[in-house]
Amino acid sequence: MVNVMGILLAPGPVPVLKEISEAQCKEMITHRSGDFTKLYGDIVTRLKAYFGAEEAYVITGSGALGLETLILNLCEKNDRVLCLPNGEFGDHQATTVKVYADATVERLEDGKGWNLERAKPHIDASRAKVLAMVYNETSMGVRNDIKEICHYAKSKGMLTIIDGISAWPGTEFNMEEYSVDAFVTGSQKGIAAPPGMALVGLSKEAVGIFTKRTFIPSYYCDLRRHKKRYEQDQQTPNTPAVTLFWALQKAFDVMDGKGGLPAAVKRHKEASLHVQARLKTMGFPLTAEAGFESNTVTGFVCKDAEGAKGIKAKLASDYQIKIVGARGKFKDNGLRIAHMGNFEMKDLDACLDGIEKIIRG
Ligand SMILES: Cc1ncc(COP(=O)(O)O)c(C=O)c1O
């Protein structure tokens, strides 16, 4: 890809390949047509297989709309929901849960990761009906151990809702294997399509829950409407962002053409290990606790706020490379490099070489 604006290494929106971008430039079709039925039918069929989901839908809107959709369809006012944040996006998830249900929030310090040992006492004590957490806490570059935690939560009869917005498809995942009932990712993250679509997956149990509800506190996001319309003619209940759906289908083609999900996970993991190793060699501590490093974004701590500001500014001005600051505890002295989507290793190395030159003066 030709990056006329330089190299974008932010954790979403990520650069969009020309072929994915150009997939949008077709003559418009109506969403009440056989052509749209074919398009959406293909997207949903593939999404179900990728996620290991009973049902999947694409909602026009950002990732947070998809997450809110899952929460409002699956959690009722008096349902106790255990939220386990460890960063900004986990906090947002807990705030969303509070709108619709009875949230119990147990938080880990920024940078620390959730594993079963840490989550188990809260699961045992909460007597919650639902567990809600983030797979990949983008703000800290932390990957939570959701597989073990969700297995345990399910063994306790809980429903599990996972924000996988910045995790998929760069991190190992399958709803069935991970005991996840509801999952969401965003089109602007690892699948590397343009922003504007939330991709949601639901287990059989989750489908059983929302289909039995008599009241859902949203019209647009009522999954009963999405299900009904999909079953009728593989269409969406309202006008979707048709052009983005073309791009998403092409993004799936690109991923499949590069070896599918296993290859995507491998590529992201290898990039993450490479970035981590080079940053450590340069003397930067990572924002993530050891053992919880994200596959898709790496945060690192500079010696002070001025150092972080200088690296970010010089990368942009001298190398046309855009990285972003860390958040929360590391918002002043932390930076993040994303290795998410259809990135190229040479771009990551250009960024790391640039950082090395900047710190050496
Ligand atoms: C883990 C996580 N959750 C939620 C969001 C919010 O997604 P969106 O901005 O697409 O609504 C983000 C965005 O960066 C994220 O990384």
Image (cartoon, grey):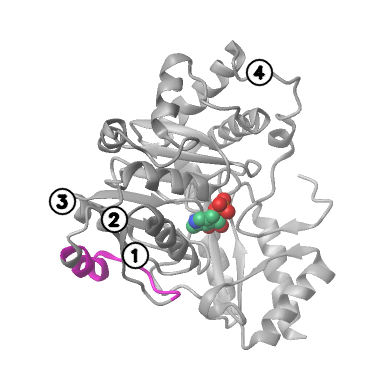
Say which residue label 1 marks. 84
294 or 48, nearer to the observer: 48
- Mark 2 = which residue? 131
**Left-right relation of 127 to 240:** left
Mark seen at residue 353: none
Is disc 2 in contact with disc 3, using a CB cutoff of under 8 Å? Answer: no
Q: Main secondary structure of the magenta part?
A: helix
Q: Earlier in the sequence, mark 3 or mark 1?
A: 1
- Disc assigned to residue 30: 4
**Marks 4 and 1, how far apart at CA:** 42 Å
Work out whether mark 1 precedes mark 2 in sequence or the reverse, and give the earlier one: 1
The answer for how far apart the CA atoms under marks 3 and 4 are is: 45 Å
Q: Which residue is mark 3?
A: 155
State which mark lies toward you, 4 or 1.
4
Please say if 37 is above or below 207: above
Dot 1 falls on a residue whose secondary structure is loop
Callout 1 amino acid: Leu
How much space separates mark 3 and mark 1, taking CA atoms? 18 Å
Amino acid identity at mark 4: Thr
Q: Nearer the viewer, residue 50 or 351?
A: 50
Residue found 51% across the figure and 25% down from its top:
237
Q: Position of residue 18 (x, y in %)?
A: 74, 38
CA gap, disc 4 to disc 2? 39 Å
Nearer-N-terminus badge (4/1):
4
Residue 55 visible in the current orientation: yes
Question: What span is colored magenta in the figure?
Answer: 110-124
